[in-house]
Amino acid sequence: MTDFTLLMQSVSDDIDGALDSLMDLYADEMLNYFYKHCWSLELSEDLCQELFVKLYTRRHQFKFRQSIGKGYMYSIAYNLWVDFCRRKATRREIDIDEYQIDSYQVDPAENLLFDEAQKDVAQSLDSLSSKHREVVLLIAFQNLTYKEVSDALNIAVGTVKSRLHHGLKKMQELLREKHAPD
Amino acid sequence: MHQIDKEDRQIISKMAQLPSVKTSSMFKSKVKKRIYDLGAKRTSSTLWQKYRPWVFAVFAHAAVLFLIANIYLHFDSSSNQISLRKILYNQRSEAINKADITAVDDFGFVVLSGVRAGSVLRLVPLKECIGVFTYNQWQSLASVTRSAYESELGFEEVEVAKNKAILLNKFQTKNYFKYNKNVTLLKFVDRLEIWNTQTLSSYLDEYPVDIKQASLFN
């Protein structure tokens, strides 16, 4: 049984302080998950807040899905992000199937925290389709296992591997193009 | 099946170098406050809050145990009362069988015929009982011993009925009828017995009657 599962069980049993421990352990991780999507701390905090509120309000549902462990938290986080994108897309009448997040993201190129190399990597990541991007993010940044990603996104493990492969190859191509001599 | 190759590792390590962010304490407080407003339990900050459920549980258990003990003692004392009454009833029956009884008063004292009115036979408060003698036995005691009983132990009067004698101490003799409600336990004796503390203990062992309980008989 993972730490996350134990903590969520405690939250679900309304044990004093369980929620505090859950937040202390996972707030940074989830904040970074959202940050890697939008590169905006403010937006990441909003989404992260929503995530913990949802984890609390849906705490009694966890027992039905506790076998997926941390994948449960990531599935909520992913849905939050997709919902957010859809709301934005609807407002801006953008195609939601292949949403282009740069319209409401902070462009990495404008982020003063990034050096040139980091900007290139972030831009190549952003240029991936949402499906590939999500898998790359979860495995490369969040260090989730294939199984956890599979549970979080509700896709087969084989699909996870395939998307990771294509995502990474696409990023490599983009980075090679950027650094190729004119 | 996809295997992460060298190029993949390079790009992953590049991604790992991207800046990350940390949650501020203000952010955490804000989120916690929002969730607490939804009804989540806060971390107990004091020992009292931490151990409060245990304290309540201990008190609740103690209260239940106290209640059970009281109920048990109530029935137990009730059974003692019954037991005591039974013993005394048997003793009185025995006295009635063996003595020439004219009356048994309300307090279980046996009044014999052939003796002076008011004389009582072998009925002595247990806790104050020193000795009960038959007349002949009393007479057979050395006069020095009798004097010692009379003076040192406060015996004032020897009631004699046929071959039997009763020793009552000063208090009993003077206040028998006045204070007979304080007489707690009656004992029938038709032979010589020196009731010292040891004898009383033996008697109590035989008839395990609490003297305090015995007062209930009255």
Image: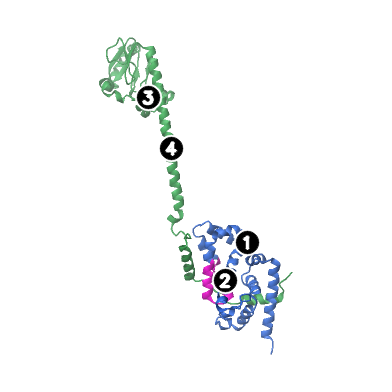
Chain colours: A blue, B green
Q: CA distance from mark 3 to mark 4?
A: 32 Å
Q: Earlier in the sequence, mark 2 or mark 1?
A: 1
Counting residues from the start of the chain, the first of labels 3 and 4 encountered is: 4
Q: Examine the structure image and report whether residue A41 is included in the region drawn in magenta.
A: yes
Amino acid under disc 4: Ala
Q: Which mark is residue A83?
A: 2
Mark nearest the camera among 2 and 1 is 2
* Mark 2, secondary structure of its residue: helix
- Which amino acid type is marked by label 2? Asp
Sort mark 1 into few (<14), some (14-19) or many (20+) by Cα contacts within 10 Å.
some
Give the amino acid at mark 1: Ile
Is residue B166 depicted above or below A135 in this figure? above
Subunit under mark 3: B
Q: Are marks 1 and 3 on the same chain?
A: no
Which of the pair B183/B63 is nearer the observer? Answer: B63
- What residue range appears in magenta? A26-51
* Viewer-side residue, B100 vs A148: A148
Residue A71: image location, x then y, percent? 61, 64
Indicate which label's residue lies in the foreground, 3 or 2: 2
Q: Is residue A108 in view from this perspective? A: yes
* Residue that badge 4 annotates: B69
